Image: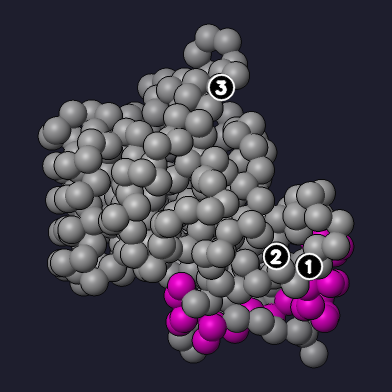
Amino acid sequence: MAATTPGLVCAHHHLYSALARGMPVRGPSPTTFRGILEQIWWRLDQELDLQMLEWSAKLAALEALASGTTTIIDHNETPGAIEGSLTVLEAACSEVGVRLVASYGVSDRHGAEGSRLGLEENRRFLAEGGRGMVGVHATFTCSDETLEAAAGLAEDHGVGVHVHLCEGPEDIEAPARLGHLTRPNWLLAHCVHLASAHHLQGTIVHNPASNLNNGVGYADPARFENPVALGTDGIGADMLDAFRLAYYLHRSTDPSATASTSWSWLARGWDLVPEARLDRVSWNYDPMEPDHLAFTTAVRPVEIEIEGEVVWRDHGPTRVDQAEVRAKASEQAKRLHDRL
């Protein structure tokens, strides 16, 4: 009999980024975090429209299921297509069969109107009953007034704020600006350059693959007293891979570290979205124990059941045509890359 676990949770994702693979980079390859943002991600997010976003989300949700991830906590940034974007993401994930906790990353990068529209999209989605948080891109791209407005909106709706925090040196002043605003239900993504002793409340979301890829450093999340969860920052949603990498990095700084610590970071996702505990994922490997999984690759789901419905069986989704999703996503990726 196959081993089973609850559905895995990706605590920080960017569904809009699934179409980025192979995108053209203008000029020399960036060598700083700010350069990566300006030459890659801020170029890409401006060109996305709602049709691209739909198929990017479907592809990302499909790949999440393929790795046993049933819940995605997403942070969307599509400044050229803000209005309705969270509903598009919700519908796309629902069609594939993945749970979504959505937010729009408010930013002043595009002026006062851009931040207003971002706040309004978060408000609209939450007011209409969407499962979500209030997103903030990062403190270094927001005024104090925008940060206050986002925190107030979250309080009004009884949810937390989902924010990039101290990912790179550009955001080093974030703790001083956010300390009086944070709450236990906030998600603080990255925290690479956050001091070990700080006064911020919330769950820190460790994104090891993204941090290595962007060359921003190692967050070393074991040093924090805050709860820690695991995310991918848009590099897929394979949470077993994220767990392994988090474990290896932890061992690189503390040879006494055990897999149970990194597994506790993965398990924090079930506290963030308790419904995922009720999902049933049957795997092609047994036992599904941290000390085994830390050294075992190619562990994949055989069957996934969410709320009594089988959404994955026999290497594919039951709700959508896998080949169609990949083909449509490829078409939208070409449209996006042509714009770039």
Estimate the x, y position of residue 83 in percent, counting from the top left: 19, 46
What is the span of residues highlighted in magenta in the rendered image? 272-298
Q: Is residue 56 visible?
A: no
Near-viewer residue (261 or 59)? 261
Q: Which residue is denoted by mark 3 in the rendering?
A: 32
Badge 2 amino acid: Ser
Mark 1 touching mark 3, by CB under 8 A? no
Tag shown at residue 13? none
Q: List x then y, in percent, for residue 311.
A: 53, 75
* Quarter of the figure with residue 187: bottom left
Pick the quarter of the image with the C terminus: top left
Residue 191 to residue 156: above or below: above
| Relative depth, front residue between 209 and 54 | 209
Q: Secondary structure at mark 3?
A: loop
Crowd around label 1: few <14 · some 14–19 · many ≥20 (10 Å): many
User: Which amino acid is tagged 3?
Assistant: Thr
Residue 259 is marked as 1
Question: Between residues 144 and 121, which one lies in front from this camera angle?
Answer: 144
- List x then y, in percent, for residue 31: 60, 19
In what quadrant of the picture does the N terminus appear? bottom right
Residue 280 falls left or right of residue 57: right
Residue topped by disc 2: 262
User: Residue at position x 70%, y 61% from top?
Assistant: 243
* Residue 291, placed above or below residue 228: below
Q: Earlier in the sequence, mark 2 or mark 3?
A: 3
Q: Marks 1 and 2: CB-CB under 8 Å?
A: yes
Residue at 80% x, 63% y is 257
- The three-letter amino acid code for the residue at tag 1 is Ala
Is 295 in the magenta? yes
